[in-house]
Image (tube, helix red, strand yellow):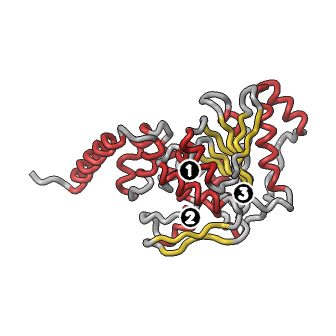
Amino acid sequence: MKISHEEQLQNEAEVFRKLFVDAAGDHSRGEILSEVEKLDRRHYSWIREEAAKLCNRRVEQIDALVNFHPPIAQSSNGERTKEQKAKSTAATVPAAERQRIAKVAPPQKPISLCVWRDVIAKNFPSLLGSAEICLSVEAQLLLNDVTNPFALALVDVPASGKTITLNFFDGPPELTYTTDCFTAASFVSHATNVRREERPSVDLLPRIRYRTVIVRELGSIFGAKDDELIKSLGILTRVLDGEGLETDSGVHGRRGYTGDYLFNLLAGTTPIQPRSSRSWATSAADCSFSHCIRQTRATTNWSP
């Protein structure tokens, strides 16, 4: 009996999915994400749902991590929603044309800082301190004398309010860039499964220029192996200088960006393991870790 080409692909996909699930059983989430990022588009499309389940993430989050672009959902009349159009437009504005002080539409109901504080204090009293700190980080982009990126990570146990606090600042796409997880390699991509003309559009660095990046989970970095962690911290250290990033590979040669690439970073993470703490402390990455979700509102700067 002759097997059609489609049936052969389905069989290959089924075998590949089984092998992937079996191989990923004894590995951490960071290791799984690192391996998934190395797959080409066809093989990734076969295991994207399994990878999301193993990493306890939505499929869309894994798609964003590996720069996989499925068809855009449309409304019943075949048109994209206003929110999708706004995010798409903001994400595709060339970095050279983006202004440091973005122009956004005024809110329908402007509120003062005092009212903003009162609303949070009434509904989330334990999160007010951390929310004020995050607001000060985002406001740094309004200061002309600020030339270096600032990174702040909220550290606490799961279900302590980190994600809720970060969601307060998931606002207009002209001001913020939100992701659930990312890898340091995504700043300047050397992926072999992306065409030459599409590479600038998948690089993370130009998309976050003059924005506040909100990362709800840093586990994809801190959960990696020691050698991958040191490599990621080296890239992150350079990016946090605010002068761009240039990298070389045997596939694409030199790729990168130079100039004023200012941005701020707000992130959340569970308590960091000692081995990750030592690697971070010995690196030159300038990042503040704030333990301010619960009653202990002490802020520790781990910069060497």
Q: Secondary structure at mark 2?
A: loop
User: Against 267, is 257 above or below?
Assistant: below
Q: Residue under circle 2? A: 188
**Structural distance between the alpha carbons of marks 3 and 1:** 16 Å
Residue 97 at x, y = what percent?
72, 69
**Residue position marked by numbered label 3 in the rendering:** 263
Front in this rendered view, residue 197 or 238: 238
Q: Quadrant of residue 242?
A: bottom right
Judge by depth and name the residue closer to the eye, 125 or 292. 292
Q: Residue at x 33, y 41 (%)?
A: 21
Asked whether residue 79 is in view, the answer is: yes
Crowd class of label 3 (few under 14; some 14 to 19; many from 20; radius 10 Å): many
Tell me which residue sits at (45%, 51%) in the image.
34
Please report the residue visible at 53 percent of the width from the left and 46 percent of the height from the top: 220
Q: Residue at x 40, y 41 (%)?
A: 27
Q: Position of residue 35 (x, y in %)?
A: 41, 51
In the shown orientation, is residue 178 left or right of residue 38?
A: right
Helix, strand or loop at mark 3 = loop
Name the residue tied to disc 1. 182
